[in-house]
Amino acid sequence: MKSELNSKIWSNSARRDNGAITIGGCSVIELAEQFGTPAFIIDEADFKARAKQWKSGLDRYFATNAGTAYYAAKAFISRDVARWVAEAGLGLDVCTGGELAVAIAAEFPPQHIEMHGNNKSEREISEAIDYRVGVIVLDSLQEIDRVARIAHAKGVVQRVLIRLTTGVEAHTHESIKTAHEDVKFGFSMASGAAWDAVLSVSKHESLQLIGFHAHIGSQIFATDAFETSAERLISMVVKYKNEFGTEITDLNLGGGYGIAYTESDEPITPEFALERLSTVVNESCKKNGISSPKISFEPGRAIVGPSMTTIYEVGTTKEVRLEDGSTRWYISVDGGMSDNIRPGLYDAEYSITLANRVSSADLRRSRIVGKHCETGDIVIKDVQLPSDIVPGDLLAVPATGAYGRSMASNYNHMVRPPVISVLNKEARIMVRRETYADLLALEIDDD
Amino acid sequence: MKSELNSKIWSNSARRDNGAITIGGCSVIELAEQFGTPAFIIDEADFKARAKQWKSGLDRYFATNAGTAYYAAKAFISRDVARWVAEAGLGLDVCTGGELAVAIAAEFPPQHIEMHGNNKSEREISEAIDYRVGVIVLDSLQEIDRVARIAHAKGVVQRVLIRLTTGVEAHTHESIKTAHEDVKFGFSMASGAAWDAVLSVSKHESLQLIGFHAHIGSQIFATDAFETSAERLISMVVKYKNEFGTEITDLNLGGGYGIAYTESDEPITPEFALERLSTVVNESCKKNGISSPKISFEPGRAIVGPSMTTIYEVGTTKEVRLEDGSTRWYISVDGGMSDNIRPGLYDAEYSITLANRVSSADLRRSRIVGKHCETGDIVIKDVQLPSDIVPGDLLAVPATGAYGRSMASNYNHMVRPPVISVLNKEARIMVRRETYADLLALEIDDD
């Protein structure tokens, strides 16, 4: 039955065993009984393997020019995950004080933390510098002055990157967009704002410019946009050398590597991307007569996305007759837009499978919906599922690791699901399920 | 300066005083200093006035046929708000155990609670019956059996409504859609499913069918769709009388009354809608030779939407040159998609105003963005704002009461903003701001 669980979509240890899906050797039936549903199941070995794949690929293809693979905390972070990231030799990309707080609580090595954000508060900058984060990515002229002032007051010389808008943008099924400048992030190379930022940083003794950063999009399935962006960053290194006589040592090519949510998605492997980009970077640097800088990346979804699976229980089913005379089966699960906002927010598509048993029943046209009081609360718009699915059955949605739990809300006062870590037939709670008491805990009662 | 704060958009007590906006007599400058930003400010008097408007309109136009105006908890609920709702003589519409838990904690009169939901769990149904909620709205055949079984086991006869799909759907700028059946909610009248549900309910002695429910959409600015839906519900009352010889006593026409987010929105008043609908209902019942049933409604957004205002502080500003040679000013605030997902989720539009002072500077084309690590994190896409806005200025976004805080997330490990209640120059915390410690509180640490 393994073949049904397409390995490009599912976490590595997902199997069928006596009909039920197991992850990390744990049956979803037992997981649901022990921890309830809905629940996020994170495959610890899968996460660590994907993290190491980035680390080893970076070391292999960039060798002495290997920078850091920064895990993007926004995809999903907890203290445990931060420790896994550190153990795998990756850095951590944080972009708020909250994400930094998790890193600090996990005692994440500060020199391997990169701080992002288009609007870091004074408090956040101060907390980052106090923890001695390795690098802060600067995003506006005001922020350059702000970070310089706070670092100066603390007697620190802060290593910084400048985030550039290279004019390259890419997403899943789109061709590369160029001249895409209408975004909140970064300094435009085309307008000259990028060079103004370089000059501004150079005036502050409390800032040490180590390089440039660019992020070009999300869910990208090809390397060409990364290559173009890398070449543009290198042109800034050349300009910098010409003007200042010294070489920039670091380039960060950002994140955005796509994963497979459905059979039709064809992601590239880290190895493929890293090999291709190392070639492009080295050739471009050689051609321009500069040393190759250290190259860093920011995989987030590409690591945790496929590592997590959501388990739902079916609550109700209903046949609805459509205008064309056909019927659609509505299957309601015990979660929805509060634990996965991506279908609503981005029209994101997911896969789904009957998880507690196999069925040889005929397939029928189904829509998986959540339990929120909202018509748009749809998990999967259109999918063929066995016609004998009944309340109590379990459904599994793979590849929910990125942004599922991290964007979860309490809409409709739903309690947010737990994250259960599985490894070698052992399951443990990494993030517990909320309770009704939690929902009331922030209220300052006036009674 | 009052005229600038269009009363159809802003909560009733919003004013300018020495340049700064005050709500409930409290200056946004002092609110920001005392409670921090971002913050939701709820105008207590405004909320109560809007709630009473629905109650008095219902009593006035429907008189002896006035049912209940059920405040839809999903828009925003807390114990205090539940008490305000009860004091105003409204009922409460809950659709999860979490929303019910707030009602129970607030000791909300159970007979005035209506329980909704397309996938109520056994636990939720049990909790609702134990609290003796006034009515449960049934949404699927499985649920009819489920509620009947649980009520029977508890020795209770539960009053129920059947949710119907009337084939009418309406939204803001769309004309009425008819034959819209492809939704998760309700039993289709057209397919015969609705009548099957009536027959199913009639077989259970533990269920007392008191009426029918229909919900036709959201942000609706006209009454015609409600009228059509009401007439279709009445046709079911007629059919029921013909078949069973008795009359259905209750109809619930649902919610969906629109509010003004921008100058171009023209919502209808409760009085206008209620007067019009009472006429339609009474005429239709008379024509069909049946008594007029009691009529209920479910305003949520229409009450709390305009009562709340979000206060943000500007963190950074940046000029971006667009492809056509023009420029756009990006203004970053200290919140974003974690406290207002509606612009991302529904392309919802909002208004925004410089709140801590007035400015006579030239206006410039601006985009208000949040601080999340995401390009789509936009609060307001395109707005003309004074060109002298700088970091530290406060911006106010009115009409964020519905779904702002209730759909809030911790995306990017942002702490969720507080809800501050203001009344007669006094401000108090209704829901406190989260802390970094709260962000870590659900983790079961493996260290």
Image (cartoon, coloured by chain):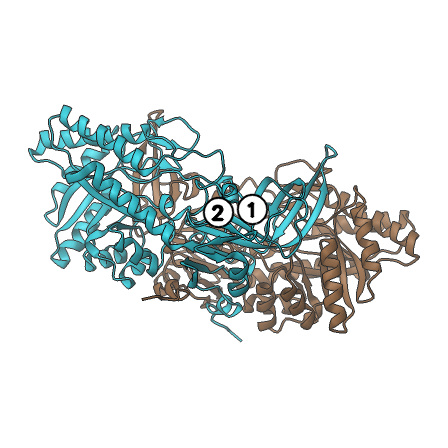
Chain colours: A brown, B cyan
User: Mark 2 near mark 1, Cβ–Cβ under 8 Å?
Assistant: yes
- Which residue is label 2 attached to? B398
Tell me the quarter of the picture where residue A362 sits.
Answer: top left
Q: In which quarter of the image is residue A175?
A: top right
For mark 2, does the 10 Å Cα neighbourhood hold few (<14), some (14 to 19), or many (20 or more) residues? Answer: many
Q: Position of residue A221 (x, y in %)?
A: 64, 43
Q: Position of residue B90 (x, y in %)?
A: 26, 49
Q: Which of B343 and A11 is in front in this view?
A: B343
- Lower position in the chain sequence, tag 2 or tag 1: 1
Chain ID, mark 1? B
x, y percentage for residue A397?
45, 50
> Considering only vertical position in the picture, is B385 above or below A207?
above
Q: Which of B406 and B240 is in front in this view?
A: B406
Asked if residue A359 can be seen in this view, the reply is no
Q: Which residue is drawn at 90% across and 59% down?
A: A246
Amino acid marked by disc 1: Thr
Question: Please, which residue is most extreme toward the bottom here?
Answer: B447
Q: Judge left or right: residue A331 versus residue B383.
A: left
The answer to whether B41 is drawn above or below residue B305 in the figure is below
Point 45% across, 42% down: residue: B9
Residue closer to the observer: B178 or A321:
B178
Query: Mark 1, residues whose alpha carbon is within 10 Å: few (<14), some, or many (≥20)?
Result: many
Q: Name the residue under label 1.
A: B353
The quarter of the displayed image where residue A74 is located: bottom right
User: Which disc is residue B331 wearing?
Assistant: none
Chain of the residue on which disc 2 is drawn: B
Amino acid at circle 2: Pro
